Image (cartoon, helix red, strand yellow):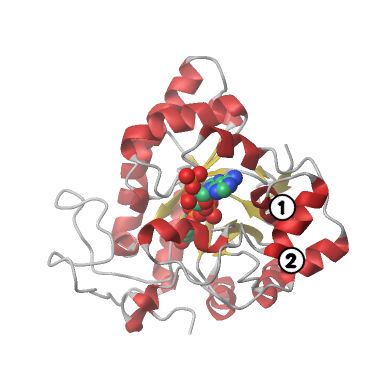
Amino acid sequence: MSSIVLARTKQEMPLVGFGLWKVTKSSCKATVYKAIQEGYRLFDGAGDYGNEKEAGEGVRQAIDDGLVKREDLFITSKLWNTFHAKEHVKALATKQLGLWGLDYFDLFLVHFPIALKYVDPAERYPPEWFGADGKTVHLQDTPMQETWTAMEELVDAGLAKNIGISNCQGSIILDILRYARIKPQVLQIEHHPYLTQEALVALARELGIAITAYSSFGPQSYVELSMDRGDSLLKNVTVSTIADRYSKSSAQVLLRWATQRRIAVVPKSNDDDRLKENLDSESFDLSEDDIKAISSLNRNLRMNDPADIDVRMSIFA
Ligand SMILES: NC(=O)c1ccc[n+]([C@@H]2O[C@H](COP(=O)([O-])OP(=O)(O)OC[C@H]3O[C@@H](n4cnc5c(N)ncnc54)[C@H](OP(=O)(O)O)[C@@H]3O)[C@@H](O)[C@H]2O)c1
C-alpha cells in the first residue's frame, strides 16, 4: 500500500485509510476489525465521533487474533474544540488514548481552529458544538499558540508521534509556523472535485505538510444529515464516464483523483463491499487529462462549515 513519508519523523502515513465519522457505536468494533482484515492500516478517529472505545476494541481484537501488530497500524485522533486550553490538551489526549486502549497516537490533530468553552467530560462526552441548552455556542478566547504548544508537549511525552491541524486555512497555518517548535506534519481538509482548494494544497506542499482529504465523495456523506449541497458527485457524468472507461466505480475514481496527487484519503463506509472497493482504489492511474477534467468540476462548494452553526465560527470566511 502506498504511503506519504511524514517530514519530521519519517513515519509512513498510508495514502488510503478508513474514516470513523458516523460509524455507529454498535457496529464500530466489527467494522474496524473487518477493515483491518481487508487490509486497512490507517484509522481516522476523533473524540467528537463518539466511537473511540468501540474502534479501539476492534483494533485490540485484531491484534489479539494476530492479524496485525500495533506498529503496523496508523491511528489518528483529534482534539475537540472544548479542550483547547493548555490544562486540558494532555488530559484529553490521555483520556482518548484510554478509550482506544493505546499508549500513543500516530497522529493527533487539532480538529478545528475554534476554541469553545470547556465541558467536563464527566458531565458530557463528546461535548459537541453546543452548551448545556443544546443550542448556544460558547466561544472561548484560547489562542492557537497556547493549544499548539500543548500539542507539542504530547510529542515530548510520547503520547503522539505526529501532530497536525485540520480545517485550517493559509493565514493560521503561517502563524503556527512562526512559533512552532514542532511543525504540523499533516493538514486535514475537506477536499473533493467541488472543493479543490488548489491554493491551500500548494501552500501545504511548499511547507512540507502532508494533506489528508476528508469527505472525498463530496455531498454523499452529508445526505444522511440533510446537510448536502450540490448534485451527487458519485453520479456526476464527468466522473462516471471516466469511471466506465477504466472499469472502476465513481467512488474509486474520486479517491484516485486525490491519491494520485499524493493527497491521502480516509473514506468511510458501513458496507463491506464498499469498504473493500475504497481500499482497492490505487490499482489504476488516471490520465493527466482525466485528472484535469475532474478538477475542473470545482465550484468552491463546502459541506462542512461551522459558520452554518454560528456565524462567529466563520473560519473559512
Ligand atoms: N477533520 C474533519 O473536520 C473531518 C470532517 C469530516 C470527515 N472527516 C474524516 O473523513 C472521513 C471521510 O469523510 P466522510 O465520512 O465525510 O465522507 P466520505 O467518506 O466522503 O463519504 C461517506 C459516504 O459515502 C458513502 N460511500 C462510501 N463508500 C462508497 C462507495 N464506494 N460507493 C458509494 N458510496 C460510498 C457512505 O455510505 P456507506 O457507509 O453506506 O457506504 C457515506 O454515505 C470521516 O469518516 C472522518 O474520519 C474529518
Give the secondary structure at mark 2: helix
What's the residue type where badge 1 is placed? Val
Which residue shows up at 50% across the image and 37% down it? Answer: 271
Q: Residue 136, position in %: x, y?
A: 19, 74
Q: Residue 79, position in %: x, y?
A: 39, 56
**Between 289 and 69, the one nearer to me in the picture:** 289
Give yes or no for contact between labels 2 and 1 (Cβ–Cβ under 8 Å): yes
Residue 279 found in image quarter: top right
Which residue shows up at 45% across the image and 45% down it? Answer: 20
Query: How many numbered badges does the structure rendering display?
Result: 2
Mark 1 highlights which residue? 253
On the picture, is 156 further left or further right than 41? left
Work out which quarter of the rendered image holds the N terminus and state it. Answer: top right
What's the residue type where badge 2 is placed? Ile
- Disc 2 from disc 1: Cα separation: 9 Å
Which residue shows up at 54% across the image and 31% down it? Answer: 35
Whether residue 156 appears in this view of the structure is no
Q: Is residue 246 above or below residue 185?
A: above
Mark 2 highlights which residue? 294
On the picture, is 246 further left or further right than 107? right
On the picture, is 58 further left or further right than 295? left
Give the secondary structure at mark 1: helix
Whether residue 57 appears in this view of the structure is yes
**Between 62 and 228, the one nearer to me in the picture:** 228
